[in-house]
Amino acid sequence: MRKLRWATQFLALVLVNIGFLQVLKLGIPCPFFYCYGCPAAAFACPIGTFQHYAALQQFPFYALGVVGLFGLALGRFWCGWGCPFGTVQDLVMLVRRRGDAFRLRRVPWLKFLVLAVIILLAWIAVDTLFCKVCPAGSLFAAIPHRFVSSELRFGTFFYVHLATLAVVLAAFFLVGRFWCRYLCPLGAIFGAFNPVSILKVKVDFSKCQRCEDCLKVCPAGIEKLEEIENCTDCTRCGKCIESCDNDAVRISASFRD
């Protein structure tokens, strides 16, 4: 499963960057936390799109519908198996090769607060303010543009982006999937769909020995077995399945037993 997850993450990175030709820039909101400012980006960033509509004081019917369909289908599976920014966090943890330096408690509501603040600021300022400090924008847009757009200058916001990226990379090194756990606004949206999404991670308590090995390896920091199926933090990454010797944890469609 680990190799399959790396393969899908690599494929997702390729797919969101097929916009190297203008005709391939589709503009459809993607199910990942990715910046549409990337020179080769083919899809729109959902959070950037929602900010844009908030600044225009219009309701994002189309964008919300597309993201809603993604959420209903797979919930936060997109975060664990496709998100390029999530992949960066996994790579940082791969370099570390050990557990979290700090064991922080879950704060499930924090991501939703971040999302609300982002949208509110866009509405008040009539501008996509979060895009100017977004760490995904730093890595996938601001830095690549330095190489492909030589006419652009190193302005204030470029250095702000570098500072933001440095801070979150340090956080990733200390706490695995820190952005996904505590701050990701798109993770908040997809997390809200986890209880109703078709795809779920389920625990068969008739097989479960309560060893909690699955919780020990959970990059989302889930603390109770009963929370796994409907938790808004679960990214469906499958590490709990890999760790279970009793075959008690599985990924399953909700309309199947």
Image: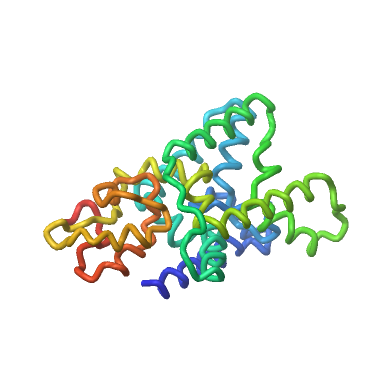
The quadrant holding residue 13 is bottom right
Position of residue 88 relative to residue 122, above or below, is: below
Q: How is the image coloured?
A: rainbow
Where residue 51 appears, as percent x and y from the top left, is 60, 36
Q: Residue furthest left?
A: 206
Which image quarter is the C terminus in? bottom left
Q: Residue at x 24, y 55 (%)?
A: 202
Q: Is residue 19 left or right of residue 203?
A: right
Depth check, front residue: 62 or 10? 10
Position of residue 207 relative to residue 48, above or below, is: below
Q: Residue at x 52, y 65 (%)?
A: 93
User: Is residue 252 shown to the viewer in this render?
Assistant: yes
Where residue 64 appears, as percent x and y from the top left, is 47, 38
Where residue 256 appears, as percent x and y from the top left, is 18, 56
Which image quarter is the N terminus in? bottom left
Depth check, front residue: 203 or 185? 203
Give the number of callouts: 0
Q: Is residue 57 left or right of residue 159?
A: left
Q: Is residue 8 left or right of residue 35?
A: left
Where residue 92 appears, as percent x and y from the top left, is 56, 65
